[in-house]
Amino acid sequence: MTDAPRPYPGYDVLAKWDTPSWDAITREVVAHRLDRVPERRFFEPAEWETLAALCDTVLPQPDRERPIPLAPFVDAAMAEDRTTGTRWAALPTMREAWRRGLAAIDAEARAVYGRRFHALPADARESLLRAIDDEDVRAPEWRDLPPRRLFRHVLANEIVRIYYAHPDAWSEIGFGGPASPRGYVRLSANRRDAWEADLERPKRRSERRK
């Protein structure tokens, strides 16, 4: 994440809590994502270390006092065998893809840097993932795994999906969350309902000079 100004400063989706936008069921779902962080159930301790480092590298959160817990929700999805419903060609099942993918990333880190992935500094982790995305790999653990497809469409996709399912991320992008029961009415381009976040547009150069 960068220090660039956020387009929705001061917006907090949780301000909708007691408004007509959310009903009891919606509040229960949001509360679950906020307060009930799952315990580790699926991944082994070494896999968990790699997973946590992978999440921090794909979506670093240095400016968050309370980072969105990504690894626990990935683990919960694997423990419950929840998938997106998509099975990519040349990839194993979701659970096996994650186990083998994390093992391959760790093996690649050892092959390139002589250390496990979670023990690398942030810039080395980023460099390693870029090489994997370019399919420039050395470790034999990749043998029948397509590196780019596994990284982009399984690992990174799930991490990003979980991030943007969290209310803190909704506030960041100005999303109002599940509009139940109120719903959204003004759905055409460049229109917004009164209860949606108001985009703060960058000032023009002439305005900044005043």
Image (cartoon, helix red, strand yellow):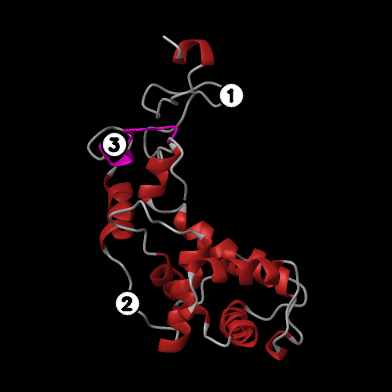
- Distance CA(mark 2)–CA(mark 3): 28 Å
Pointer 1 residue? 188
Residue type marked 3: Lys
Where disc 3 sits, the SS reads helix
| Disc number for residue 39 | 2
| Disc number for residue 141 | none
Q: Nearer the viewer, mark 2 or mark 1?
A: 2
Q: Is residue 160 above or below residue 146?
A: above
Residue type marked 1: Ser
Q: Is residue 188 left or right of residue 60?
A: right
Where disc 1 sits, the SS reads loop
First along the sequence among labels 2 and 1 = 2
Pointer 3 residue? 16
- Quarter of the image for residue 187 reads top right
Region of the chain picked out in magenta, as a range: 6-16
Q: Nearer the viewer, residue 75 or 59?
A: 59
Residue 67 placement (x, y as % from top left): 34, 58
Main SS of the magenta part reads loop
Residue 89 placement (x, y as % from top left): 77, 73
